[in-house]
Amino acid sequence: MNNKKIMLVIILIFVLVLAGAGVLYRNLGQAYSPEQLATQPQETGQAQKLKAPDFAVYDAQGNEVRLYDYVGKPIVVNFWASWCGPCQMEMPDFQDKYSELGENVQFLMVNMTDGSRETVQTAADFIREKGYTFPVFYDTKSDAAITYGAYSLPTTYFIDAQGYAVAQATGAIDAATLQRGIDMITK
């Protein structure tokens, strides 16, 4: 009986410590998180412009598509995989923005298709299951990933209508950060 009381007290203390840690994480994490959008460095009061490098990916029918095919419109490039939890978390926000701005902003949702962990089929099944309608492209030859150094998923690039890289975010972004990036390329 005495052992049961001791165990109950220990469990109760453990639960209280976990709850307190959760509250601290939520409150302090927001206050001390770094700015997620990295922008081009400032040079003499003006942004230094960096041309976004071109890459080749493939659409669902296997046709080659190049980034430069879309220059003339602001472009959001998102590198993702269906097995990536943070990618899955941000996708509803990308779908909402695509539904709202798809005529004015080109979304290139680039799947990191390595042929083993991620295949065209698994990615297409995921997109269909979730009901996403944004354009999905498959990086089956890793051209886009190597060109942009996208080794951490998700990674998002914001490219203006002239083809200049304006901002980049590594890790899942929320709707507000996505909107800030879009605002940067639609001015």
Image (spheres, rainbow, N blue to C red):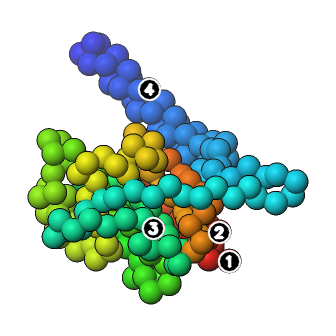
Q: Alpha-carbon distance for marks 4 and 2?
A: 48 Å
Residue nearest the observer in this picture, 79 or 13: 79
Query: Which one is in front in this view, the residue at disc 4 or the one at disc 2?
Result: 2
Residue nearest the observer in this picture, 43 or 105: 43
Side of 160 relative to 77 (left or right): right
What's the amino acid at mark 1? Lys
Return the mark for residue 68. 3
Query: Which one is in front in this view, the residue at disc 2 or the one at disc 3?
Result: 3
Q: Alpha-carbon distance for marks 4 and 3?
A: 58 Å
Quick check: marks 4 and 3 in contact, CB under 8 Å? Answer: no
Query: Is label 3 in a helix, a strand or a loop?
Result: helix
Which residue is located at x 37 percent, y 73 percent?
95
Q: Alpha-carbon distance for marks 3 and 1?
A: 20 Å
Tell me residue 112's x, y (percent): 29, 50
List the residue tagged with mark 4.
13
Query: Is label 2 in a helix, a strand or a loop?
Result: helix
Residue density around tag 4, few if under 14, some if 14–19, many if 20 or more, within 10 Å: few
List the residue tagged with mark 2.
184
Query: Which one is in front in this view, the residue at disc 4 or the one at disc 3?
Result: 3
What's the amino acid at mark 4? Ile
Residue nearest the observer in this picture, 76 or 72: 72
N-term mark: 3 or 1:
3
N-term mark: 2 or 3:
3
Quadrant assignment, res 177 = bottom right
Query: Is label 1 in a helix, a strand or a loop?
Result: loop
N-term mark: 4 or 1:
4
Which residue is located at x 43 percent, y 47 percent?
147
Quick check: marks 2 and 1 in contact, CB under 8 Å? Answer: yes
List the residue tagged with mark 1.
187
Position of the C terminus by quadrant: bottom right
